[in-house]
Image (cartoon, rainbow, N blue to C red):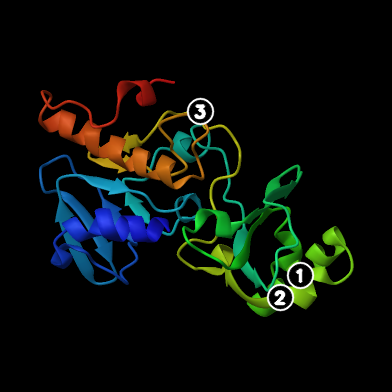
C-alpha cells in the first residue's frame, strides 16, 4: 500500500524524535522573521522558519486551523473551489471470482468504482474485490455502520451479477470510512479543476498550502502521487528561496502545465 511506501522510503529516513503523532494542529502563526513560524496543537508549540500544510481540503475549509493572519479569501474560493467528496473504500473477499476485473457506474457528482484487488497484489491467490463509493454514491450509506455498508454492497453486487452470487461466496470485509474520520472527513477534492497551479504561499512566503487539492500536474488531485508532488514542489520552492542555485527536484515538464 501507499502507507507501506511512505513508511519504507520516507519515514524510515527520518529521525523518529522529529515525528509527532496524535497532535492535530489547531493554530499557525506566520511571522516574517526566521524561526518566527509558530505551530500549536493544544498546549504544545513548535517553531520553524517555514511551514508546509498538507491537511485535507475539508480541514482547511471548515476552519479547524486558526491561521494568523488568516489565509487570503481567494485561496479556498477562486483558487480551489472544490469540496471534499464524502466516501469510503471497501474490500470484500470471496470464495470464488464472479466479477469483472474493473467496472464503474457513471455519476453526476461522485464516483462508484470496483476493481479486482487481487490483480495488484503480487502472489495473491485470494479473490478480493475493492470498491470506492464517493460523492452521490456515498449518500445512501452515510448513517450506516461498517457491517451495514458491507451488507448493502453485497446486495448491489447480487443485483448486478444476478441471484445471490455475491452473498453466497462472501467471506469477509474491511471498510475504510474516511467520511467519519474526524481528521479527514472526506475522500479527496471533487473532480473540479483547480484554478491555481501547485502549492500556494501565504505569510510572507513562509507558509505553503499543498497536498492533493493543489496538484502540480493537471488533474492529479485525489492521487497519492499528486499529493506527494505538491508537497515536494513546496519544499523545492522554499529551498530555492534560501539557495537559488539548487536545482528543482521535480522535472520541469511536470511543473509546466
> Is disc 3 surrounded by few (<14), some (14 to 19) or many (20+) residues within 10 Å?
some
Q: Earlier in the sequence, mark 2 or mark 1?
A: 1
Left or right side of 106 for 57: left
Would residue 231 be visible to someone looking at this image?
yes
Secondary structure found at label 2: strand
Say few, some or many: other residues with alpha carbon within 10 Å of mark 1 (under 14 / 14 to 19 / 20 or more): some
Residue 205 visible, this angle: no
Measured as percent of width and height from the top left, residue 83 is found at 58, 46
Q: Residue 25's x, y, as percent? A: 32, 62
Mark 2–mark 1 Cα distance, whole angstroms, equals: 8 Å
| Mark carried by residue 55 | none
Compared with 44, 160 (above or below) is above
Q: Which residue is mark 1?
A: 154
Of the numbered discs 1 and 3, the one sitting upstream in the chain is 1
Give the quarter of the figure containing the N terminus: bottom left
How many numbered discs, if any?
3
| Spot occupied by residue 65 in the image (x, y as percentages of width and height) | 38, 57
Please tell me the numbered disc located at residue 170. 2
Q: Are marks 2 and 1 in contact (CB under 8 Å)?
A: yes
Mark 3 lies on residue: 195
Q: Is residue 91 above or below residue 82?
A: below
Residue 105 image point, x, y percent: 76, 48
Amino acid at each position: 500500500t501507499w502507507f507501506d511506501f511512505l513508511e519504507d522510503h520516507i519515514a524510515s529516513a527520518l529521525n523518529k524524535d522529529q515525528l509527532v503523532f496524535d497532535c492535530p494542529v489547531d493554530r499557525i502563526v506566520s511571522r516574517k522573521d526566521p524561526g518566527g513560524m509558530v505551530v500549536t496543537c493544544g498546549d504544545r508549540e513548535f517553531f520553524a522558519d517555514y511551514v508546509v500544510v498538507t491537511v485535507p481540503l475539508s480541514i482547511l475549509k471548515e476552519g479547524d486551523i486558526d491561521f494568523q493572519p488568516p489565509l487570503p479569501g481567494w485561496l479556498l474560493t477562486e483558487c480551489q473551489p472544490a469540496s471534499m467528496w464524502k466516501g469510503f473504500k471497501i474490500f470484500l473477499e470471496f470464495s470464488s471470482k464472479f466479477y469483472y476485473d474493473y467496472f464503474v457506474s457513471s455519476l453526476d457528482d461522485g464516483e462508484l468504482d470496483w476493481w479486482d484487488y487481487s490483480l495488484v497484489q503480487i502472489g495473491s491467490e485470494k479473490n478480493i474485490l475493492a470498491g470506492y463509493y464517493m460523492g452521490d454514491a456515498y449518500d445512501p450509506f452515510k448513517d450506516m455502520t461498517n457491517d451495514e455498508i458491507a451488507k448493502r454492497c453485497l446486495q448491489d453486487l447480487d443485483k448486478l451479477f444476478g441471484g445471490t452470487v455475491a452473498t453466497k461466496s462472501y467471506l469477509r470485509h474491511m471498510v475504510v470510512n474516511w467520511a467519519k474520520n474526524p481528521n479527514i472527513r472526506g475522500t479527496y477534492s471533487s473532480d473540479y479543476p483547480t484554478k491555481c497551479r501547485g502549492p500556494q504561499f501565504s505569510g510572507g512566503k513562509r507558509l505553503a498550502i499543498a497536498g492533493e487539492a493543489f496538484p502540480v500536474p493537471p488533474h492529479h488531485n485525489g492521487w497519492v502521487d499528486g499529493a506527494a508532488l505538491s508537497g515536494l514542489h513546496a519544499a523545492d520552492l522554499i529551498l530555492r528561496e534560501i539557495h537559488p542555485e539548487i536545482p528543482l527536484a521535480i522535472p520541469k515538464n511536470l511543473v509546466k502545465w
